[in-house]
Amino acid sequence: MQVVVDLNRCQGYAQCVFLAPRVFELHGEESLLYTPSVPDDQRERVVQAATACPVQAILLGEAAGVA
Amino acid sequence: MSRDPWDGRIVIVGASLAGLRAAETLRAEGFAGELTIVGDEPHPPYDRPPLSKQVLLGRARAEDCVLPARRETGATWKLGVRAAGLDGDGRQVILANGEHLPYDRLLIATGTRARPWPQPEEAALDGVFTVRTMEDAGRLAERLDAGPRRVLVIGAGFTGSEIASACRERGLAVTVAERGPAPLIGALGGTVGSWAAELHRSHGVDLRCGVTVTALRGSGGRLTGAELSDGSALDVDVAVVALGAVRNTEWLADSGLAAGPKGVACDAGCRVVDMYGIVTDDVFVAGDVARFPHPLFQYQFLALEHWGNAVAQAEVAAHNMISRGRERRPHLSVPAFWSSQFGLNIKSVGVPTFSDQVVIAQGSPEERRLVAVYGYQGRVTAAVTVNSAKSLEHYEELICTGAPFPPGPDAADHVPGREPEPSDVPDPRGLTHGPTVALTGHLPDRRLVVLRPGG
């Protein structure tokens, strides 16, 4: 599973950081860094994070292309 | 063209963010015909913003940055092959391997590439990098892991600044050389640029403005140093060339379309214009390679190297490719981008370079939290926030409604005694880094030709 965050939309509420800290990380007060390729054991947490995002900035999906 | 807009053959040239999102939108909106996507890189679509951030910080691997799909596209992917030409009359794309791809409708989404170091022998030295592709970022991250003595970053635009920031965070010595007077000045103007200069220096960057790198020196094929225009020399084992981007339009040179170094011109509906200024109805464009008229900015043609624009424009272009007449939509979204550097979140909405004045409306440079509001001829045209992302939506509304600038005494963000100052947007020709927003038209009030009566 891959993740991309629309950082134009992100306002740093950091719900994702609480729910899936191994994938989402705040860098400073407001900058979000994330691991684009989600480890299998983090999928459930990342789905929760995407659902909880107040501005719905997190997109999850299987890797694009060549299918 | 096939009479049914949901049928026929669509070719998308460009397999990055814009190409992918366009393909998904075509299917989501009912396109049932043949879809082919051509990409010159061998990879499926991947996300570039993390390459100069997470990847250089060592927190993600370059090859992991593949984009998530929104849906299946059922497309035929032709990856690792470049488009070499376009036969608009015969409606076919000519690939570098000689293959001809016939289409009924075409989307151009070929984007940009890193502007290379102008001296090919110097550019070929081991230790000289650009950061645009997955391979670029992966190789540079590996080299940074090895602990170079000093990194030279040539160009202090957003990419150059992010690279310098990542190096400092890794504890590496870094010099940034910029021909202009300050970092980020091409995108944000001189007032915010001077703040950015202070930011670099307070994080230990050896920032040299007003200088150019005149030569890269090597020994045995490896980079050893650089010479600057002020006569100084540096010992460096890594140099990152961050001179901005070049639009991938060469393949359209003989196409008869309005395509050149500034991009591919289109109308508000993403339909490409030909060299006579007449709009086509079967060729569309989206993403970094497009230049399009924007009503919020006096219909000037904008070329935006922005993630958000690639997505929004791809969606509009795809919609219009399979819609008729009044079902078509204009691409009107307000330009926006973000950058993460030195632990700060910098975001922008509107076009800061489309301005004559700027005022710090909230916060202050000292707090490392601020909102800079830009105005042009008395109305708000842009806002830049530093660690104040939640304010951005408000300013987007002001930009869209043409609110007066500067914010009046009744405005919540009015700070008494804080007056607007010139935004100090430089001529982009005087910068090392290219601006990521190019105003590619001319303002109606800037007369470029003066007619003098004879006698």
Image (spheres, coloured by chain):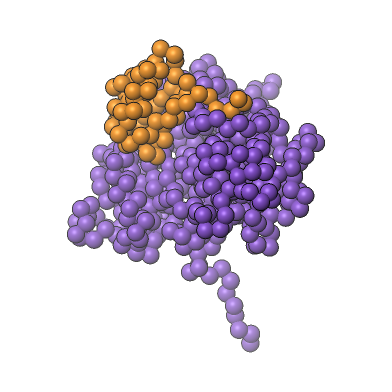
Chain colours: A orange, B purple
- The answer to whether residue B199 is left or right of residue B364 is right
Camera-side residue of B244 and B14? B14
- The answer to whether residue B340 is left or right of residue B89 is left
List x then y, in percent, for residue A53: 32, 31
Q: Residue at x 34, y 59 (%)?
A: B401
Please state, as top left, top right, bottom left or bottom right, where the C terminus of chain B lies in the image: bottom right
- The answer to whether residue B308 is left or right of residue B77 is left
Classify residue B234 by image quadrant: top right
List x then y, in percent, for residue B55: 48, 24
Q: Residue at x 32, y 46 (%)?
A: B393
Camera-side residue of B273 and B69? B69
Camera-side residue of B148 and B380? B380
Q: Residue at x 58, y 48 (%)?
A: B322
Classify residue B199 by image quadrant: top left
List x then y, in percent, for residue B207: 45, 36
Residue B62 shows up from this direction: no
Residue B339 shows up from this direction: yes
Q: Residue at x 35, y 19 (%)?
A: A45
Q: Given the current orientation, which residue lies at the most extreme right position?
A: B98
When the figure is inspected, residue B168 is found, relative to residue B429, above or below; the finding is above
List x then y, in percent, for residue B125: 66, 26
Classify residue B342 by image quadrant: top left
Q: Given the current orientation, which residue lies at the most extreme bottom position?
A: B455
Camera-side residue of B452 and B16? B16
Label tally? 0
- The answer to whether residue B32 is left or right of residue B390 is right
When the figure is inspected, residue A20 is found, relative to residue B68, above or below; the finding is above
When the figure is inspected, residue A25 is found, relative to residue B1, above or below; the finding is above
